[in-house]
Amino acid sequence: MRHASALVLGSLLALASVGCQSKEEMAYKPTPASTAPKPQLPEVPVVPTNFKQGDAYTVYGLIHHLNSRIHAKDVTGKEVTVVGTIVAENISTADSCAWHKVGKKDPDDCKTEVPTFVIADDATDAKKPRIKIMGWASNFANVFEAFNAYKGKKEAPKELVNDELNGKPIPFPLPAVGARVKVTGTYDYTFSTSSDVQSDVNGIVTYAKLEVLEPAAAEVEAPKPAPKKK
């Protein structure tokens, strides 16, 4: 009881003290501005909105939609058209063991890739997102036939070289770094063949059609022959 009484008495004395203060003493006194150096805050980032260029997606826009909860349904597993600049191809770096006429078997120890080219919005910035284009040729033997049929030609022949395995005409000109292209095909995280499945977080376009908007400065080169064994 004594402890409780002391608390009550203390509270009453505090209130009395406040009540005795003058208006001048109760007046608001602003705190002086801080003299400390101001923090260096980063600029507010600009969120890109360049999802399309005309009727085609940009590379950024297509990847954005693939990973968007809202837009994924519009592009995943759907036929899309995307525009970009070719920044890589694997024709000129293909293993020479796979570079031959159709009908000839690759050596058993021949390790080869699926013919692929890669497009980006900005060819000068390696950090910009990229998308692989696959399915335009089933193997390098078909690319070999197209390479020899198209080499040196400024205009497409009346009949393009037809890929014997996938039944698609191989695009003219063959994909070369620097060309600005518009590609139509099915877009998804994966690309599959009868013997292989590949995946990519940026998605892969399975080729159906290609339009060259700006040609490359030079034709794609053939793979260099493998060095002879000593």
Image (spheres, rainbow, N blue to C red):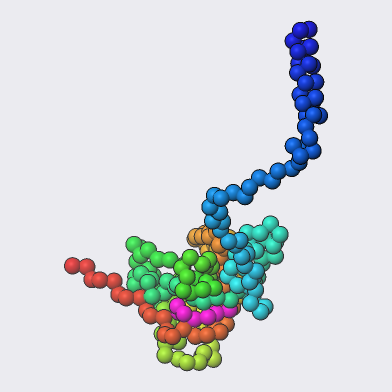
Within the magenta stretch, is there residue 44? no
Left or right: residue 144 versus residue 14 is: left
Residue at image coords 38%, 71%: 94
Q: Residue furthest top?
A: 1
Quarter holding the C terminus is bottom left
- Residue 75: give x, y in percent of width and height: 66, 65
Q: Nearer the viewer, residue 215 or 98?
A: 215
- Residue 64: give x, y in percent of width and height: 62, 63
Residue at image coords 52%, 85%: 214
Residue at image coords 51%, 73%: 122
Corner quadrant of residue 23? top right
The answer to whether any part of residue 162 appears in the image is no
Left or right: residue 62 versus residue 177 is: right
Q: Nearer the viewer, residue 207 or 3?
A: 3
> Magenta segment range?
176-182
Corner quadrant of residue 48? bottom right
The answer to whether any part of residue 110 appears in the image is yes
Q: Is residue 34 above or below residue 73?
A: above
Left or right: residue 226 versus residue 162 is: left
- Residue 44: give x, y in percent of width and height: 61, 61
Residue at image coords 58%, 79%: 182
